[in-house]
Image (spheres, rainbow, N blue to C red):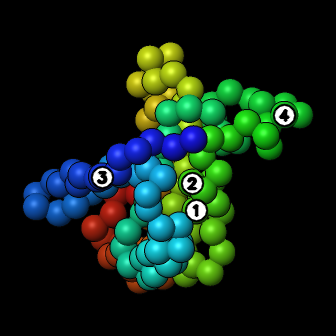
Amino acid sequence: MGMISSGSFVVKANGQPIMEYSFQGSDFSNEKAVIHIQSSSYEPIFWQFMAIGKSNKGTKPRGFLRAFQSDFSFLEELDNLTGRYLDNANFFSVEDPQMISDHELYDLLMAEYPGWVRAASDNGLILRETSRIR
């Protein structure tokens, strides 16, 4: 039930990575991904996962059948992963990207990031004076 391809690309500003876009299919290792997310929680890295399709963390409420309708249970697991220094990941899904406004997409993308910036600053992963988020 997954995509067949996988890949990623990084967006940079002033030569520094600010966002990584990744998509992964059924050929990746869940164990390696878990280790990577846990290990990167000690680094100034925040992972934002967005999927197109049905999930328990989608923009539409699912009601009683919610637990049975996710196409992205592994990404949901990464979002709630234990064993991390800081919560360094978030996940959401949209069923139809054409039906979501830019404003709503921005809100979804920023749901956990400002909290991570504050926690990363408080724990010395990033310099407070370099962050505009307080």
Residue 105: % across, % down: 46, 32
Give the spatial CA distance, label 1 vs label 3.
18 Å
Look at mark 4 in the image and give the residue it sits on: 65
Which type of secondary structure does the marked residue at label 4 adopt? helix
Q: Secondary structure at mark 1?
A: helix
Residue carrying label 2:
75
| Disc 2 from disc 4: Cα separation | 19 Å
Q: CA distance from mark 2 to mark 1?
A: 5 Å
From the image, which quarter does the C terminus lie in? bottom left
Please tell me which residue is depicted at 23% across the width and 54% down the height of the picture: 10
Q: Position of residue 49 (x, y in %)?
A: 47, 50
Residue occupying image coordinates x 89% and y 34%: 64
Toward the viewer: 8 or 119? 8
Q: Is residue 89 above or below residue 122?
A: above
**Marks 2 & 1, CB-CB < 8 Å contact:** yes
Say which label, 4 or 3, has the lower sequence index: 3
Residue on which disc 3 sits: 7
Q: Residues within 10 Å of mark 2 (few under 14, many from 20)?
A: many
| Disc on res. 78 | 1
Left/right of residue 84 with respect to residue 27 in the rendered view: right
Question: Which mark is nearer the camera, 1 or 3?
Answer: 3
Q: Amino acid at mark 1?
A: Leu
Q: Amino acid at mark 3?
A: Gly
SS of the residue under disc 2: helix
- Residues under numbered marks 4 and 3 in contact, where contact means CB atoms less than 8 Å apart: no
The disc, 2 or 4, on the residue closer to the chain's N-terminal end is 4
Distance Cα–Cα, label 4 vs label 3: 31 Å
